[in-house]
Image (tube, rainbow, N blue to C red):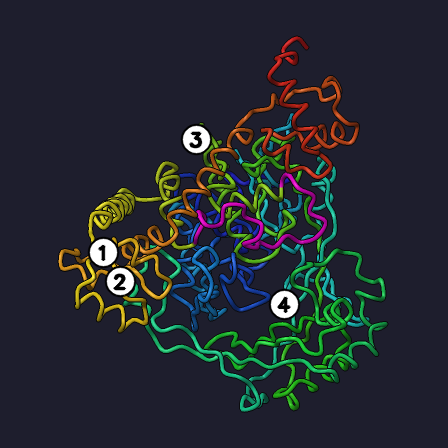
Amino acid sequence: MNYVDEKYDVVVVGAGHAGCEAALACARLGLKTIVFTVSMDSVAMMPCNPNIGGSSKGHLVREIDALGGQMGINIDKTFIQSKMLNVSKGPAVHSLRAQADKLAYQTEMRRTLQETEGLTLRQAEVSSLIVEDGVVVGVNTYSGASYHCSAVVLCTGVYLKSRCLYGNVIEYTGPNGLKAANNLSDSLTENGIRLRRFKTGTPARIDGKTIDYSKMVPQYGDDPIVPFSFTTDRDSIQKKQVLCYLTYTNEKTHEILRSHLDESPIYGGVIKGVGPRYCPSIEDKVVKFGDKDRHQVFIEPEGLSTNEMYIDGMSSSMPEYVQYEMYHSVEGLEHAQIVRNAYAIEYDCLEPNQLKPTLEFKKIKGLFSGGQFNGSSGYEEAAAQGLIAGINAAQEILGKEQIVIGRDQGYIGVLIDDLVTKETPEPYRMMTSRAEFRLLLRQDNADMRLTPIGYKVGLISEERYQRLLDKKKMIEDEMARVRKINFGANERVQNFLLKNNSTELKKGVTFKDLVCRPELNYDLVASLDDTAPELPLEVREQVNIGLKYEGYIERESKQVEEFHRIEDKKIPENLDYELVPSLRIEARQKLSTHRPQTVGQASRISGVSPSDISVLLVYLKSGKYLDH
C-alpha cells in the first residue's frame, strides 16, 4: 500500500453538487480539504435536467446562498433563462427557476473549486474507508494510495455500482457514460452501513435543428430577472434570454408506449431499484395516469454552445427504436433526431436513518454523508445536504457544536429531518407541502432566517452580515412607521383608489389597511405618502409581505412555539426503550433502530403513534431512566 505524505483535514468523496458545496464549506472554514471525483468531467455536472430551482427547490437554493454556499452564485453567472414560478399564488410558494448553460455551470463551479485556497481537486476512485475503533481516519483509492484525515464526507451521488439501461441494453457506467464507482459499496457494507438500490432516469437529447418549434408554445423568461443569490446585483444579470417551448404527448404516444411495455426494463423486471414517485418516466405516467389523454413536454436548451435540447417530461428506458417512435409522435418532434438516448440509471445509496440530523453517521464518528447517496433526488436537495455535511464535518474538527437546521428554520431542515427520521422507500423530492411552516419559510426571507447561522459558522463575511442587519432595521423601522400613517377620504386618495380598481373610502383608514387590499401593495400605497422614505426593493418587498400577511404570520409563529414544546425535548442517547412501560412493540422496535435525538424526531418516525409519544414524554418526565 502506498501512503500519501500529506494528511488532509477533510476528504470529500464525489464532486457533484453535494460534493462541491461540502468541499467549499470545509476549505472556506480553513481546513485542508481534498475532493475526489471519478472523472474531472463529472465536477458539478448536470446529467439530467438543465435547470436549477423550481417549486420548493428554489427555496433550497436561496437557503444554500443564505448560509454561504455557492449554488445560487453559480447559477446567477451561468443561467440562460429565469422565471419566478407560482406568482399567481401567495408568497409562500413563489419559487425561482433558472435554465442553466450546463457547460458554463460546470466550468464556473470547477474554476471556483480550483481557485479556493486549501482545496485540492483530485481525479481518483475512492475504494474503501479506513475506520479504527468506530472512527473514520481516512480513505483508500483504487490505485492503492491512502489519504488520512479527520473527517470524510460521502457525496457519491448515483455512481456506486451504477448501471444505465434502455431496452435490453445495459451499460455499467455512471451518467452520460462516465465511469462508475464499483468498489466503495463493499467497504461501506463491511463497516455496517446498510445500502439499497434506487433508480432514476433521464429523457433523450434531441438535435434542435430537427425540431419544428412553430407547432409549440414559446415559454418566455421574466423581465426583470430576479437573482438567486442575495449577493448578486440585480442590474448585472438583466440580459437577453433564450426560449423554451411547450408541447404535449397524445394518444398515439401513449399507445406506442402501452404496446411496448414488455420491452421496458422497468416493467420487465430488469431494473430492481425503486424510482422517484414525483418524477416518473413517460411509460410510468401512461400506466399510472391512464385517464390522462396528454402530458406536458417542455423543450429546453442544454446551453449556448450546443444544439442539444432536453425533452423534459419524457424520461424513459424504452429501447432505442421505441424512443424514436414515441418522440416522433409528439407534435413538433415528427422529424427529431436523437443525439443521446434516454436511459434509466440505478445505483447503490444509503438508508438515511443511519444518520444523525447533523448528517454524521450514528455509528462511525467523523463520517458524514450528503446528496443523492442519502436517498434524495435533485441537484438542489443534494447541494443543501452537502453544505450541511461539510459545515458539520468542519465543526467537528474545529471542536465546535455541529448545526441542525430546524423544520421551522428552513426547507433544508425539513429535507434532512424527513430523510433521517421518516421512511424513504423512494428517492426523496422536496415539495412545499412537506413544510409545516411554509409561510415563515418563504424564499424571499431566506437570508433573514439563515444568514445569522452562516455568519456564526464562519461562511458569511462581516460585511455581508452587517448589510443584513441594516436591511432588517430598515424593514422594522418602516413596519413601525406605516402603522402610524392614516389616509382620509379626500379627493387625492379616492382618485388613487379608482385608478387602481379599488373601492373608495367612506372613512379614514391606515396605510396597512390599504396595503392589505388584494389589488394594492406597499409601493402603490407609498405613492400616496409624502413622508415615505426611499428604500431598496428588497426592503419594500419584505414590508409589503409583512403587512399583507401579518395575521397569518403571527398565527404560524404561535404554531412554531407549540411545535418546540416537544421538538426540543432531548432523549438520552442510551435510553433503553424496552424499559419504557406501555410503549407498543412496534414503537420500541422503531425507536431502538432510529435512535432519535429529540421527542420531535421520534414523533415523525413511521410506526410511532401520538399515544407512544405521550407515553415517552411521561417516562422522560418521571426520570426513571436515570435509575438504569
Mark 2, mark 3: which one is toward the viewer?
2
State if disc 1 and disc 4 touch (CB < 8 Å): no
The amino acid type of the residue labelled 2 equals Leu
On the image, the x and y values in percent for residue 549 come to 39, 52
Residue at figure coordinates x 48%, y 47% from the top left: 23
Q: CA distance from mark 4 to mark 1?
A: 65 Å
Q: Earlier in the sequence, mark 2 or mark 3?
A: 3
Figure check: 99 above or below 149: below
Marking on residue 398: 3
Q: Earlier in the sequence, mark 3 or mark 1?
A: 3
Crowding near the residue tagged with mark 4, few <14, some 14–19, many ≥20 C-alpha atoms within 10 Å: some
On the image, the x and y values in percent for residue 153 come to 56, 42
Marking on residue 176: 4
Crowding near the residue tagged with mark 2, few <14, some 14–19, many ≥20 C-alpha atoms within 10 Å: some
The amino acid type of the residue labelled 4 equals Asn
State if disc 2 and disc 4 touch (CB < 8 Å): no
Figure check: 188 above or below 45: above
Residue 43 relative to residue 112: left or right: right
